[in-house]
Amino acid sequence: MDLLVIVFFITAMWLIRKLAWNVEEGTNEQRERNPELNTKNFDMHERRLEQFSKSKYKNRMFYIGADGTCYYYSATGRKIFC
């Protein structure tokens, strides 16, 4: 019985994270003008990277460096190049 409760709890947390974690913020127009608002639209993400050199995509802030490379920071603070 305890195992069933643990499995249910883990499944519920996974569903909540999957459905609510990557929520888009603001309207389309607001997201287009503000790169710090979260988006799930990859095309909008690329446009914002070109225009502002940064964009928040699926709750992760991406940056374009001076040399044109794309990167983000990991949870430990390391630069991860993409």
Image (tube, rainbow, N blue to C red):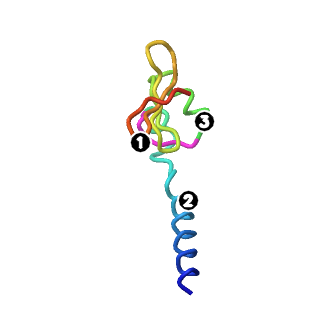
- Amino acid type of the residue that numbered disc 3 sits on in the rendered structure: Phe
Say which residue label 2 marks.
19
Mark 1 → mark 3, Cα distance in angstroms: 22 Å
Front in this rendered view, residue 20 or 66: 66
Say which residue label 1 marks.
75
**Quadrant in which the N terminus is drawn:** bottom right
Main secondary-structure element of the magenta-colored stretch: loop
In the current view of this chain or complex, which residue is farthest to the bottom? 1
**Quadrant in which the C terminus is drawn:** top right
Q: Is residue 60 above or below residue 63?
A: below
Say which residue label 3 marks.
42
Instruction: Specify which label sits upstream in the sequence, 1 or 2.
Output: 2
Instruction: Specify which label sits upstream in the sequence, 2 or 3.
Output: 2
Q: Residue at x 58, y 81 (%)?
A: 4
Q: Is residue 60 above or below residue 69?
A: below
Q: Which residues are magenta?
A: 34-40
